[in-house]
Image (spheres, rainbow, N blue to C red):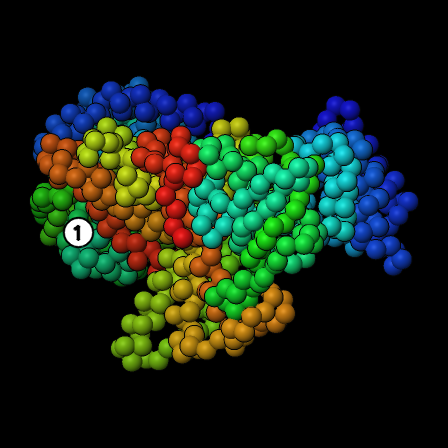
């Protein structure tokens, strides 16, 4: 708790907000209530006063959440309202935006009136995001954008997008990028659903065809894009942190449930008995892996509290990606012939368009989990990071450093 | 469950590590593993007198320090790291815990103070020639003759079985599974050292032919005692495995930084880097497994069987994975006798099998949590 405001004073402020406007009042919609919450400095208390905050520490937001939760039912969740805008857009705008940008963007991000998306990855720049090739060329007070982004969640609902593009190809790759806030409705922006192996389109491809963007929409300076992007990505990690801490919860529960149902289906022939034992051991191995991941998270939390973070905090992403894939691979084996069908089908749809039930949930997860070891850092990149940053092994020999971006070999 | 170590825990770890760095370096390990006894008696005495490690779990009134499973795990982890050759696991972990759990006050009073002072070696003889790890696999018999019993049967492999002054033997009477004390000089006992795969840990085959034995605790009451002792032993062994696994990872990383091929450190190749990263993941998993089991032994006894089964399965597999990959990272040199990689590799495989293979412990887990 900060020295200026005590916990009880902060709780009092929440109660004052609720006495003026209450989210459980049927005439108050989420946007209106969140707007008032912002105006009271209770949106993100670690932000400055006047910009949705009170200049407190980030941890104090938990007090606000607790007080709101104890006194109101209709509290909307930041992740549901505007996950990327609130989790990543707002902190980036706050750090690198002009005062005008703060005024213009932060409040509607928090209320959810303006949804944000993030456009970094490209077909030719996945693990190597800094190698991206979408171009912005200066034209008077504007820049003209051409190129393509991919894996853009929420682009089809977004008002604004965080856009990282190349502004100077003659510089080394990390130095020639700039960062813009792009109006997603601008002429030349084309958002198309990206059909994935589950049949759904959680993500989009975004094409830019001579899209004009004012120079005033640049976040940070020209050439500073990579640094700004790092701020965005660091907040992605913060936003995604947090894990279940009860044994057997989360995805592993699905496998346990499947096993407990299916284990009765094995017959008494020698072959069936052997198959059952093999399947059971796979379930047990996976269960233990899940438990080890959970405990590793617990150890990481404990050492954070003691201020000495060790390697246990860095292995989680790799462990969980590989585990989640395995959980549903084993579950599919347990399903036997039922694994051969896929009720939802593969016709292009947005998530939530088709409610899934029963085994379909497992089969869908089996397909969806392939992405876990690709998105947010592939397992191979995570292994490089563990090897170099945790174990201190030397970096790979690189041929893309200290050379102009245009001279780096590229596929396609 | 709170998984944080205290300042005192940290101090204990550092104390043991400093001692073992001095007394159990590679040269010392190699010297001891070639002897028949397999350890250095002067180091054993110092472990008793200077560090109080032999009486770690012995109550203060019996000359110990009265600590618990977490402290034992710390000590075992350090011993595993330095591959200490000593009858610690047999005497203190198996023997000491069996006496403490037996509830036989007089026997504890007689033996534990001597054990804590390093004057007496113990071991626990459970498994037999059928190779089963379950208590139901025990067939050794004990027959009442007057006031005492005589044992018949074979126990193998028995850790430090040729060394032990007092053997604690599991055998069946008409009342069921019971525990017996057999002294080193007992008649009708033949102890034959076995050539161990892992020469840092000595094994023996022991044959009883109408060997006089003294009942420990109540006749027919050994099952619960042994279950608990073997859980505690699994936790300690998993801590030892964690320490060994960390040592292997450190060795591999060090070598990957120093070894130059194709004009660069081999650690700059992703093939090696990714191996090391996977080893790190396994080491951290082993650590999570053994720490959570050790803490549960103290904080949540009802959970111990579950966490011990997971710990034994996970840490021993992790140790073997890391020890094997360590040889691979080293290449040819890792296959030579001169290099210590094989010592850890052999310890790792023997730790995987000792007290039951990973799949055996997973079956125990399945029964406990209805999987």
In this rendering, the answer to whether A293 lies above or below B337 is below
Q: Is residue A234 left or right of residue A412?
A: right
Picture quarter with the C terminus of chain B: bottom left
Front-most of residues B362 and A334: A334
Residue A124 pos. (x, y %): 45, 50
In this rendering, the answer to whether A367 lies above or below B290 is below
Can the viewer see residue B363 in this picture? yes
Report the residue at 47% width, 24% height from top: B7
Q: Which residue is mark 1?
A: B155
Quarter residue B79 falls in: top left
Mark 1: give few (<14), some (14-19) or many (20+) Cα within 10 Å. many
Front-most of residues A102 and B107: A102
Can the viewer see residue B186 in this picture? no
Count of numbered labels shown in the rendering: 1
Residue A23 pos. (x, y %): 83, 52
Name the chain under label 1. Answer: B
Q: Is residue B232 left or right of residue A253?
A: left
Residue A81 pos. (x, y %): 71, 52
In this rendering, the answer to whether B360 lies above or below B117 is below
Q: Residue furthest front?
A: A140
Front-most of residues A146 and B303: A146
In this rendering, the answer to whether B299 lies above or below B75 is below
Report the residue at 52% width, 69% height from top: A199
Quarter residue B360 falls in: bottom left
Report the residue at 29% width, 72% height from top: A274
Residue B347 pos. (x, y %): 21, 41
Q: Is residue B35 left or right of residue A367?
A: left
- Asked which secondary structure carries label 1, the reply is strand
Front-most of residues A217 and A32: A217
Report the residue at 63% width, 54% height from top: A189
Q: Is residue A39 left or right of residue A137?
A: right
């Amino acid at each position: 708790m900060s020295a200026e405001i005590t916990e009880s004073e902060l709780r009092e402020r929440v109660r004052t907000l609720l006495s003026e406007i209450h989210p459980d009042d049927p005439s108050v919609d989420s946007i209106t209530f969140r707007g008032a919450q912002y105006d009271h400095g209770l949106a993100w208390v670690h932000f400055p006063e006047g910009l949705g905050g009170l200049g407190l520490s980030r941890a104090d937001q938990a007090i606000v959440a607790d007080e709101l939760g104890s006194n109101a039912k209709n509290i909307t969740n930041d992740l549901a309202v505007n996950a990327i805008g609130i989790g990543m857009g707002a902190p980036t705008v706050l750090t690198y935006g002009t005062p005008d940008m703060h005024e213009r963007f932060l409040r509607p991000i928090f209320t959810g009136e303006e949804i944000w998306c993030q456009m970094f990855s490209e077909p030719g720049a996945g693990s190597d995001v800094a190698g991206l090739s979408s171009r912005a060329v200066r034209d008077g007070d504007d820049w003209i954008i051409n190129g393509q982004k991919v894996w853009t969640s929420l682009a089809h609902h977004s008002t604004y997008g965080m856009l990282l593009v190349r502004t100077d190809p003659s510089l080394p790759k990390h130095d020639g990028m700039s960062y813009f806030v792009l109006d997603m409705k601008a002429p030349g922006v084309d958002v198309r659903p990206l059909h994935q192996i589950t049949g759904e389109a959680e993500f989009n491809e975004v094409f830019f065809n001579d899209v004009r963007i004012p120079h005033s929409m640049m976040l940070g300076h020209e050439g500073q894009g990579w640094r700004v992007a790092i701020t965005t990505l660091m907040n992605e990690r913060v936003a995604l942190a947090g894990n279940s801490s009860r044994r057997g919860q989360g995805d592993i529960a699905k496998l346990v449930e499947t096993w407990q149902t299916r284990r009765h289906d094995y017959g008494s022939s020698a072959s069936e008995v052997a198959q059952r034992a093999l399947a059971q051991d796979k379930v047990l191995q996976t269960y233990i892996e899940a438990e080890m991941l959970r405990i590793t998270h617990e150890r990481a939390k404990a050492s954070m509290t003691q201020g000495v973070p060790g390697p246990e905090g860095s292995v989680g992403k790799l462990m969980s990606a590989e585990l989640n894939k395995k959980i549903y691979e084993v579950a599919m084996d347990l399903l036997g012939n039922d694994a051969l069908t896929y009720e939802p089908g593969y016709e292009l749809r947005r998530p939530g368009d088709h409610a899934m039930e029963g085994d379909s949930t497992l089969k869908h997860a089996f397909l969806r989990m392939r992405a876990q070891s690709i998105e947010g850092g592939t397992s191979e990149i995570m292994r490089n990071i563990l090897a170099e940053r945790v174990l201190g092994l030397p970096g790979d020999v690189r041929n893309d450093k200290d050379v102009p971006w245009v001279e780096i070999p590229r596929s396609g | 469950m709170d998984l944080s170590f205290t300042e005192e825990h940290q101090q204990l770890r550092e104390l043991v590590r400093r001692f073992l760095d001095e007394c159990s370096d590679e040269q010392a390990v190699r010297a001891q593993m070639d002897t028949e006894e397999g350890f250095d008696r002067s180091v054993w005495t110092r472990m008793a007198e200077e560090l109080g490690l032999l009486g770690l779990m012995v109550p203060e009134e019996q000359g110990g320090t009265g600590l618990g499973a977490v402290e034992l795990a710390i000590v075992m982890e350090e011993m595993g790291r330095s591959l200490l050759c000593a009858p610690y696991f047999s005497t203190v972990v198996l023997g000491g815990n069996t006496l403490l759990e037996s509830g036989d006050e007089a026997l504890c009073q007689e033996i534990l103070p001597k054990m804590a002072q390093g004057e007496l070696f113990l071991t626990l003889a459970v498994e037999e020639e059928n190779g089963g790890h379950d208590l139901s696999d025990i067939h050794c018999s004990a027959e009442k003759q007057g006031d005492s019993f005589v044992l018949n049967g074979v126990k193998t492999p028995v850790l430090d079985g040729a060394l032990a002054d007092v053997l604690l033997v599991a055998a069946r009477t008409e009342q069921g599974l019971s525990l017996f004390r057999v002294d080193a000089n007992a008649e009708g006992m033949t102890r034959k050292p076995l050539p161990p795969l892992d020469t840092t840990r000595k094994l023996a085959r022991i044959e009883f032919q109408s060997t006089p034995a003294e009942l420990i605790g109540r006749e027919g009451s050994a099952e619960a005692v042994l279950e608990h002792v073997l859980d505690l032993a699994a936790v300690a062994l998993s801590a030892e495995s964690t320490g060994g696994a960390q040592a292997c990872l450190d060795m591999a990383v060090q070598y990957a930084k120093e070894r130059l091929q194709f004009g660069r450190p081999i650690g700059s190749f992703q093939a090696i880097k990714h191996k090391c990263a996977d080893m790190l993941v396994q080491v951290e998993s082993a650590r999570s497994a053994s720490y959570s089991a050790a803490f549960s032994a103290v904080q949540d006894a009802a959970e111990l069987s579950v966490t011990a089964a997971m710990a034994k399965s996970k840490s021993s597999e992790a140790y073997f994975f890391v020890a094997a990959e360590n040889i691979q990272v080293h290449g040819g040199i890792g296959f030579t006798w001169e290099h210590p990689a094989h010592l850890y590799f052999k310890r790792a495989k023997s730790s995987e099998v000792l007290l039951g293979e990973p799949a055996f412990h997973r079956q125990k887990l399945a029964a406990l949590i209805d999987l």
